[in-house]
Amino acid sequence: MKQLRKKLLETAAGTGSWHIPSGLSILDVLWVLYDRILDINPKKMKSQEHDHFILSKGHGSLGLYVVLAEKSFIRKADLKNIGKFSSILGGHPDRNKINGVEASTGSLGHGLPMAVGLALAQKISRDPHRVFVLVGDGECNEGTIWESALLAAHRSLNNLCCIIDFNHSTDRALSLGDLAKKFESFGWKVKEINGHDQEQIHSALKEMSDDKPLAIIAKTIKGNGCKMMENNPEWHHKALKLEDLPIILKELN
């Protein structure tokens, strides 16, 4: 993971990309998904016969891009061009340009509704594959999240897993309180984990219920691994300068 974090930071500094702490917050979850959980590979994307993943918090795309590059969905050379006019990689992921991206996201609150629709379609067609979606805790302020949560429970979508990146980034604006109890009250099975412990992540993602969707509350640190960025609101949308890169990379060691 240290090498993956290093690649994310080098990419951010080289391209002037932003939302670096959000990418670091979800990097462990994304890696476990693509490395150990998802029945998916670059050649399977043209069919629907695979597991599905939607990154609802599209601004965390830096984390997704470095994982997709590591898993050969995109070329590692593509990372050098993030944000450029001719690049396939923008500030938010685009399903029409990027192999491995199934939903264009970034407008918060929309990824879970799409995942619910996909999971319901899978159920109707008796497709055994699962649907995973990753949302942010701030995104849980959106009404569409809870409308979708009600529908998923009503339809007993046990093939659906929603991972909540609970890094408390929304606390300064609106506290979400006990997210686990909220999802449970909406009829979901809930697991609370350390979102940077890959064994906990793997164990939780493997779980399924007979008749309930699964919500995984991943307790994370925004900017995980970089002391300069960790839980520091200043870095939410701040670009990393090349001259500051050696200082931050030294922290990783």
Image (tube, rainbow, N blue to C red):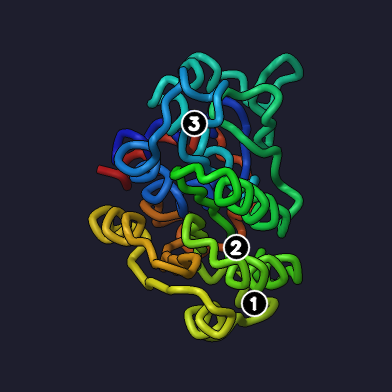
Give the CA separation, mark 1 to mark 3: 42 Å
Badge 1 amino acid: Arg
Q: Which residue lies under the disc numbered 2?
A: 233
Q: Horizontal and vertical percent for residue 67?
A: 43, 33
Q: Nearer the viewer, residue 123 or 162?
A: 123
Q: How busy is the neighbourhood of tag 1: few (under 14 within 10 Å), some, or many (20 plus)?
A: few
Q: Residue at coordinates 47% horizontally, 61% vertically from top-left?
A: 158
Q: Earlier in the sequence, mark 2 or mark 1?
A: 1
Q: Horizontal and vertical percent for residue 159?
A: 48, 55
**Quadrant where the image shows the C terminus:** top left
Q: In the structure shown, which secondary structural element does the residue marked by tag 3 occupy? A: loop
Viewer can see residue 226:
yes
Q: Residue at coordinates 54% horizontally, 38% vertically from top-left?
A: 62
Give the CA separation, mark 3 to mark 2: 41 Å
Q: Is residue 10 above or below residue 152?
A: above
> Residue 49 bears which disc, if any?
3
Q: Give the image quarter of residue 228.
A: bottom left
